[in-house]
Image (spheres, coloured by chain):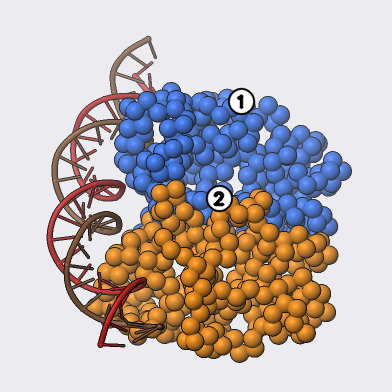
Chain colours: A blue, B orange, C red, D brown
Amino acid sequence: MKRGQAVMTLFEIRKMSAHLPNPVPRAGGVVSPCSACNVRHLTLCAALDDREVTEMSAIVSSVELGPGEPLFDEAEPAKNVFNVTAGAVKVYKLLPDGRRQMTGFLFPGDFLGLANEENYAYSAEAVTFTTLCRFPRKKLEGLLEKYPLMERRLLGMASHELAVAQEQMLLLGRKTAREKVASFLLMLSRRAVQRGQKDNPISVPMSRNDIGDYLGLTTETVSRTFTLLKQAGTITLLGNGKVELSDRKTLEVMSDGA
Amino acid sequence: MKRGQAVMTLFEIRKMSAHLPNPVPRAGGVVSPCSACNVRHLTLCAALDDREVTEMSAIVSSVELGPGEPLFDEAEPAKNVFNVTAGAVKVYKLLPDGRRQMTGFLFPGDFLGLANEENYAYSAEAVTFTTLCRFPRKKLEGLLEKYPLMERRLLGMASHELAVAQEQMLLLGRKTAREKVASFLLMLSRRAVQRGQKDNPISVPMSRNDIGDYLGLTTETVSRTFTLLKQAGTITLLGNGKVELSDRKTLEVMSDGA
DNA sequence: CGGGAAGTTGAAGAGCGTCAAAAGTAGTGG
DNA sequence: CCACTACTTTTGACGCTCTTCAACTTCCCG
């Protein structure tokens, strides 16, 4: 099980730039990293006005990760919480023998690191080249007391996550491989729309193995299912991690079990 | 699919009384239903002092359900949130063809009905004779603004739920039938302890079918797995929904996949 | 007791996993 | 620019766990 190869190629740097029309300056830069944030309306910070965001930026720093680089590990002290600003992150739990369950894929605007306990309940790792903003947990808690709207927003985000988790339980416990893959593709499409991207060809940056671990399947079953959907004309593999949903209706019917 | 038979037998009434050493008076009663609450330390209300609890009790009413009676349905407007005070509740989601996934079993002290959207994201139904306290959502939101500690507590409860949900995803996606059942029994035991009950013979009030829908298995597989554990001497079925964990060590090793 | 639901057990089959190998893809170095 | 290497993806054959279908048993509660 290898991980954390921090090789950043020219290709990935180009890709990163493409994702960041307004690149977020590093912590310690002259400009507030938050005032230029292009996903603010999606995040925790949506609850703050400009002045408050400036105050917030005093405690925030920026993190950049290459594909496969770990952000934190399960059971590690939960010192920070993060907001994804560009790229994609996977979060997962492991069994002692190495079996892995992805509990989510996170995209720009998504929040991670919320932990009730002292330690993280899961591991997090970059899928693509990724940038995040980091909030020291202690300091964030101080701000939460000061800005009740922010706490309200956090509660809203947590209860949204809870609804998503319940939907995922339905998928894992009761859906077939075909239904799982169809649901997965539609989820990627819907979330792309939320981020202001277009709903059709979708970007699928994660590996078949990662998808399998998210859906409770093996790499092989995921691959076979993609092939089946392709042969049925429901999707088209465009290469380079792009997938066209050629027959969205069918996917939708399929995802709910018909 | 039948549901909602509100038949309350003498036996159940006796059982109810056993669960409620200090029965909660109905709303409109002379005594505040909350001041006598015997699970307050487990709930949302743990964040409040006596005076505040009295204020809270003005908006609270009590609900009683017989086995199988629905509390609310998925997609119904989320007008109330609830705290279980006695008994057990199951919450679940359905697929159009009737496949069901339990997303949780709730016991005294547990909270349900948190919904970010207008409507409930799941259905809820009593397992045994159950009592709950009901908070109109609008009024509760008012109190949350007044008592930030309560909002803090709610956030804590939500993020705990989130961690539990992730653990359940690991179970559903990656564990075998044996591992699932072992994990389930241990969870019941741990939660009994949290409520101040003893950890060993545990009460398993739900049917094999309900357990199956919680673990992503069929009734038959759950039953077979119970039989295997029984034959291996790991558990003992005491009848009447009571199970003795005869070899907890083995169950623990088993639940994590060894 | 007696009837109906819940639970158990058995036999057969399907879906997905496992193991293995081939094909495709991307990055490296000649 | 093309060949080489390493990894990911795809495809195939086979096996196993869990499901399905069915019958039987047990447990409640009237």
Q: Which mark is residue B34?
A: none
What type is the residue that disc 1 sits on? Ala
**Kind of element beneath mark 1:** helix
Residue labelled with disc 2: A164
From where the camera sits, is residue A101 visible? no
Question: What subunit carries mark 1?
Answer: A
- Identify the image quadrant of the N terminus of chain B: bottom left
**Neighbour tally class for label 1: few under 14, some 14-19, many 20 plus, Cα within 10 Å:** few
Front one among A98 and B41: B41
Query: Which picture quadrant has residue B205?
Result: bottom left
Q: Position of residue A171 (x, y in %)?
A: 44, 49
Q: Are marks 1 and 2 in contact (CB under 8 Å)?
A: no
Q: Is residue B61 shown left or right of residue A122?
A: right
Q: Is residue B232 shown left or right of residue A193?
A: left
Question: What subunit carries mark 2?
Answer: A
What type is the residue that disc 2 sits on? Val
- The residue under the point 42% across, 70% down is B184
Q: Position of residue A208 (x, y in %)?
A: 39, 38
Identify the mark nearer the N-term, 1 or 2: 1
Q: Let me know if marks 1 and 2 both belong to one chain.
A: yes
Front one among A33 and B79: B79
Is residue A149 shown above or below A29?
Answer: below
Front one among B121 and B222: B121
Distance of label 1 from label 2 (alpha carbons): 29 Å
- The residue under the point 30% across, 70% down is B223
Q: Is residue A148 shown left or right of residue B211?
A: right
Q: Is residue B158 shown left or right of residue A232?
A: right
Residue labelled with disc 1: A18
From where the camera sits, is residue A105 visible? yes
